[in-house]
Amino acid sequence: MSFRTRLILINSLAVFLLLGLGMGFLVIRTQKVFLESIDRDLSNRATKMGRGGGPGPQGPDGPLGRNGPPGSIGGGNPMRNPPGGFNDVERPIILASDGSPRTPNSRVLDPLGVKRVRGGRPYFSDVQVDGELVRVLTQQFRRPFNGVDEEPEENFVQIGHSLRDFDRMKETQAGVVLILLPVGVLLSALIGAFLAERALLPVRRLAGAAATITGENMDVRLDASSGDEIGQLSATFNSMLDRLQGSFRDRDRANQKLEASLEAQKQFVADASHELRTPLARLRLTTSGALQQDSDPAELREALQIADRAGVSMTRLVDQLLALARLDQKSDLSTDSCFVREFLEEAKGILKPLTPGLEVSIQSNARVRGSSSDLARAVINLVDNARRHSPPEAPIRVSTSLNGDSAIVSVRDSGEGIEQEHLQRLGERFYRADEHRSRKDGGAGLGLSITKAIVERSGGTLRIESVVGSGTTVELILPIFSQLDESNKSQTSVS
């Protein structure tokens, strides 16, 4: 059952109950008022008879009243033929205490009425007289019957009133109810259907617009210009679509990032395997050749030196791979901090014996984000690259400076330089600007990748400038740690 049908049925049921209760109350109230009017008329007539005395002597047309013309009872009120024409029923009857009529040629309307009167209170009853329903009042009174000097006797008056008009009124009311109730319910159903159609039309439009929204078509928005509940629903639906669209975009970006990471991982594994294969092949050929022939000690020593260099190359490659894996696991910014002088002194202590032309000038000192060992490793990698691409004992200068809220560590050499087309790709894993020279020198193309990862984890950037034939300058631009803390604190307090 549709919501529209349920709405019409609920509306029709509500109208049916309201009309039924209203008409029922009106019918009951009208009948009660009608009966109260009849009872009031009967009571007034009985009271007048009680005040006027007994029926008096008999006349040709009935009892003669003492103070009135023939046909009057007691006080001269003409009660013999009241309005309505139902004379036999509506004529007052005087009854004795045993219930027998004192009025000649009269019949008792309710034989049990005298017995039901208690304490002088009137008794009303409905009886059938000649096939018609009659409302009968039986009331007790004490008055002399024939003379003034007589003792008051216990008498009863019994008066009836035909309920013919009351029955006709009930029939009319029943007919009106049987006609108005179904007609009212039918009209309410038609009006309810019209109103339900008008009320549900915006909902249908809303459902139609929502049906056109798919995962590939998330730009559809519903009309939320109206200020009613439908407009509020449309605005809420549009907000939900905005959130879903944002979630889908985040999901797509995450999927793209994941795919890129998987592709990079595959490439990384392939490159690592390729880099390890060269020293392993060299080591295996050297050892196999040394074992398969009778070699003198000089040849064996040379073979061992070749194997040692291959082992050193593999150890260095494995160390670099482990360093990259460790940095990849820590994608957030580093929570450590150190002074520029601290990690430069550590790098200088390791590089000085191996690099005769090294010059370190610490002109400014600042606290930066990152661990001292990681930043020292970044400087060592840069100096090592500069040493391998510079003439022997050529000067390699390491200097520091401040630029606003950043500390800059520069590594400058006077080597062969790097062509411009290679500068954008420097820092990619296993990328070499000079493939032949790098392999010969033992480089795997991971030094700059490690340096870049360390600098980015410290919140900084890596900048490379080079001129072919004049040398290369690499700058580590590191944000000053104390200023970053103050900025974060101010943003937190403002928010």
Image (cartoon, rainbow, N blue to C red):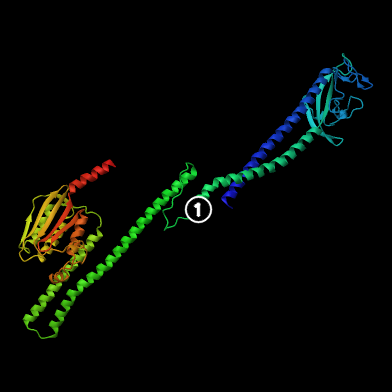
At horizontal 19% and vertical 46% (from top left) the residue drawn is 483
Quadrant showing the C terminus: top left
Against 285, is 205 above or below? above
Horizontal arrangement in the rendering, residue 71 relative to residue 40 (left or right): right
Against 70, is 277 above or below? below
Crowd around label 1: few <14 · some 14–19 · many ≥20 (10 Å):
few
Which residue is at the front of the view, 154 or 469? 469
What x and y, as percent, mark residue 193? 61, 46
Instruction: Give the residue type that dot 1 points to.
Output: Gly
Which residue is at the front of the view, 338 or 127? 338
What x and y, as percent, mark residue 235? 44, 46
Q: Can residue 372 be seen at all in this image of the molecule? A: no
Q: Dividing the picture into quarters, in which one does residue 27 lie?
A: top right
Horizontal arrangement in the rendering, residue 377 relative to residue 187 (left or right): left
* SS state under label 1: helix
Horizontal arrangement in the rendering, residue 43 relative to residue 60 (left or right): left
At horizontal 79% and vertical 35% (from top left) the residue drawn is 168
* Mark 1 lies on residue: 208
Q: Dividing the picture into quarters, in which one does residue 389 lie?
A: bottom left
Q: Dividing the picture into quarters, in which one does residue 297 lie?
A: bottom left
Q: Can residue 419 be seen at all in this image of the molecule? A: yes
What x and y, as percent, mark residue 271? 23, 70
What x and y, as percent, mark residue 393? 4, 64
